[in-house]
Image (cartoon, rainbow, N blue to C red):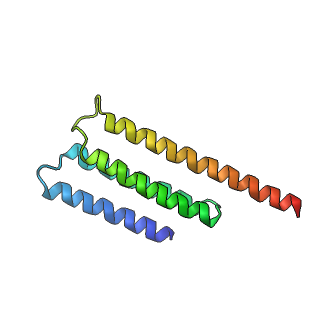
């Protein structure tokens, strides 16, 4: 699964960059921000695949990160072409913070459950 995440992330970034080169209305700012969104989504999915989590948690995070990645991609695709006073960027930062916190909490809860199971046996 890790190789799939890496190759799909790289492939999506390449397609995004090619679209930025080909389409004249696809501004450089939007190409850059959507590429960052693809990279962050890929990184979070990769982290979720490497840390020890139960399968149900892992699958839930894959879906959550991918769905929110699509939302952030669309936000960045249609956002204004500047960084200042750009609420789409602010919302995307909040989403990434939420995803990171959710992953950390899930990891800690999973460790706690695993530790309790070991102690009770």
Front one among 71 and 22: 71
User: Does 39 appear above or below 7?
Assistant: above
User: Does 62 appear above or below 98?
Assistant: below
What x and y, as percent, mark residue 23?
13, 55
User: Looking at the image, which residue is at 24% across and 43% down?
Assistant: 29
Q: Name the side, left or right, on which 50 lies relative to 121.
A: left
What x and y, as percent, mark residue 96?
46, 44
User: Does 59 appear above or below 76?
Assistant: below
What x and y, as percent, mark residue 54?
65, 64
Q: Visible in this render: residue 36? A: no
What x and y, as percent, mark residue 109?
69, 51
Residue 47 figure quarter? bottom right
Which residue lies most toward the top here? 85
User: Looking at the image, which residue is at 57% across and 62% down?
Assistant: 58
Q: Name the side, left or right, on which 40 lies relative to 17.
A: right
Front one among 76 and 27: 76
User: Looking at the image, which residue is at 32% across and 62% down?
Assistant: 12
Q: Name the side, left or right, on which 116 lies relative to 18.
A: right
């Amino acid at each position: 699964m890790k190789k799939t995440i890496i190759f799909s992330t790289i492939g999506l970034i390449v397609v995004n960059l090619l679209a930025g080169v080909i389409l004249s209305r696809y501004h450089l700012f939007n190409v850059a921000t959507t590429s960052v969104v693809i990279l962050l989504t890929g990184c979070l999915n990769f982290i979720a695949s490497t840390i020890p989590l139960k399968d149900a948690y892992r699958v839930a995070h894959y879906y959550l990160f991918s769905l929110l990645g699509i939302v952030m991609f669309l936000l960045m695709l249609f956002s204004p072409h500047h960084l200042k006073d750009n609420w789409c960027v602010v919302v995307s930062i909040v989403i990434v913070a939420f995803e990171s916190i959710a992953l950390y909490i899930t990891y800690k809860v999973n460790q706690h459950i695993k530790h309790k199971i070991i102690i009770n046996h």
